[in-house]
Amino acid sequence: MKADTLDLKDIFRKDTRYVVPRFQRPYVWKEEEHWQPLWEDLQLVVDELMDRQAGASTSIERQEAQQNTSPHFLGAVVLDQQSTPTQKLETREIIDGQQRLITLQVLLSAVHFVASDFGYREPASLVEKLMYNDKDLTVTETDRLKVWPIEADQDAFIDVMTFSDPESDHAELDGDENLEECFQYFSDEIREWAEAGEESPEEHLDALVTTMWHLLRVVVIDLESNDDAQVIFETLNARGTPLLAADLIKNYLFREATLQHNDPGELHDKYWKQFDEDDWRVDVSQGRLDRPRIDVFIMHWLTMRMSQQVRAKKLFPAFRRYLDRTELSVEEIVKDIDYYASIYETISEPDRGSREGIFFHRLDVLDTTTPYPVLLYLFGQESVPQPQRVKAIEAIESWLMRRMLSRLTSKNYNKIFIELLDELKTQADARAGDTVVEFFRSKEGESDYWPSDGKLTDSMVNSEHWGITNQRRLKMVFAAIERELRNTGYSETLEFTQDLEIEHILPQKWSTHWSLPGERPAEVERMERDEIKNRVGNLTILTDKLNPSISNAAWDDKREAIQEHTVLRLNKHLVSSWPYEWDEETIAERGEWLSEQASEVWPEPNADYWDE
């Protein structure tokens, strides 16, 4: 067999027909598992390319920017050469990788559709070269398509691949087929992305097309006549344990150590040996996926060191670039990794009784790891005073929690924290907390501003949170308010020992015991109540036994049961402040009260708290 790393231009530019054997499965990729991660990875490459090309005034400078942009590796495909007559299309069977190649073609068609719709002929024309074979080499119209799926997918594939062709009869898509959903997903995402930001849609699309031509890489394995296609397919998909990115980094580091005349065995035993333990190789949550803990740590460490987003899928190539550019020796690098590994262990398994431990527990509930490169820096710099470190994490927590409670977007958090990291590196460590506060205070965009008390109150009083905000996060909010109400300070440990549940005070099924006011048409009042019942003011936390016992009860019965059994101050305040009735007005009043308590836990940007 012959293996080469090729970009999409090398694969799709030549006149070749890639045929899926009829016995293979149909197209099965889906949005959450496949299309969305691919689009997010592609965006990162395009954004890096645009950042590097910003200010480039000549074609040489643009070419250099392209060469310095990190490509994205899409995996491997296995192809088997088929015999073809002279002057006919070269044909290859796709032994492995049909889902990937079909998705790439649908993605190209979506780019073509959006570019054509905007009237940008040049990027659309370039994309066509990756979508269609030369007409002079084709017998049928469908021969023009670079990839040809199995029969079950052929009609839908033809539709999405010819949809933006002005000569095509396909004026609309039914949207029922998986391939059509794929096309619609990419079209919508590309259009929204192209219209966002400071650059024009044309600049966005030009960069996207350049990326798809040159910066998406695939390992193409071409089989030879004596290769057993089935055995190779099984080997790639079912046999062996894949190497971790950390394994590749380790091998590369110690090979370089030998070249620098260091003893790799000594360096390994002194600095790296811990990473061979199973604890570092277990999977931990990283966004939607689970990844080995050692890979996640090195990704955060490398992001911190490079002040550049490092993608998990591109960890090893990113590390090689760092090693090529740094002036540090291998020994200095492995020593630094060893030092920050101890920091990472401290912050990933903190003392829950400390302010730092409370912060990291809440960060875990928020299920975000984007601040970790900043946190490695803050906790790794011995020159950062402890009070300033606490101020920094409290500002980060307030910013994250207020945005979550205000139901604001979490997009671009990676970029924001890298920007914060750069700011911290240029300012004095002695005032790191003040730097973090000033950084977030300066943000005014929709994706990065620090919400005020007014915005927080508006969301907690008027917006639905049940069914939208993760229940674990809602429970964490109530737990934080309870801690604040008890006013014990952070030196005392006060954690719930039970798995408490979110309870609707006005029940989800309220019609039995809760009559409508009757002041307006019943349908209007019913619709409003069904929305209001999911607001924060109507929610609380109860034990798993008390909750179902009073779930749909009337307010008098529910209040008495809560009053008898609860030990939580937020629930005691509930039953004492509204003893007679519970309705839309009192829900709003309690939502406002809860927002006031939340503001005490997470002070607003202009609060005097930050200037103390």
Image (cartoon, rainbow, N blue to C red):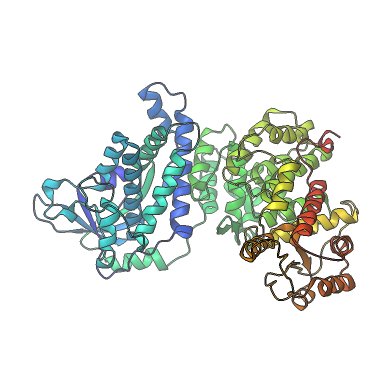
Q: Is residue 98 above or below residue 500?
A: above
Q: Is residue 278 left or right of residue 563?
A: left
Residue at the spot x=74%, y=76% of the render?
548
For the C terminus, the quadrant is top right
Give residue 215's position: percent from left, percent from top. 39, 41
* Relative depth, front residue between 510 and 111: 510
> Residue 610: percent from the left, percent from the top?
81, 36
Picture coordinates of residue 560, whole percent (x, y): 87, 73
Image side of residue 6 versus residue 313, left or right? left
Please tell me whether residue 526 is drawn above or below residue 210 in the rendered image. below
Looking at the image, the residue that sits furthest to the top is 57
**Residue 379 in view here:** no
Q: Is residue 361 above or below residue 60?
A: below
Can the viewer see residue 515 in this picture?
Answer: yes
Residue shown at the point (69%, 57%) measured from the top left: 365
For the N terminus, give its image quadrant: bottom left
Q: Is residue 445 above or below residue 223?
A: above
- Farthest-out residue, left: 86
**Residue 212 horizontal side relative to residue 600, left or right:** left
In terms of image quadrants, where is residue 591? bottom right
Q: How many marks?
A: 0
Which of 518 and 46 lies nearest the eye of the viewer? 518
Residue 378 location, x and y as percent? 73, 40
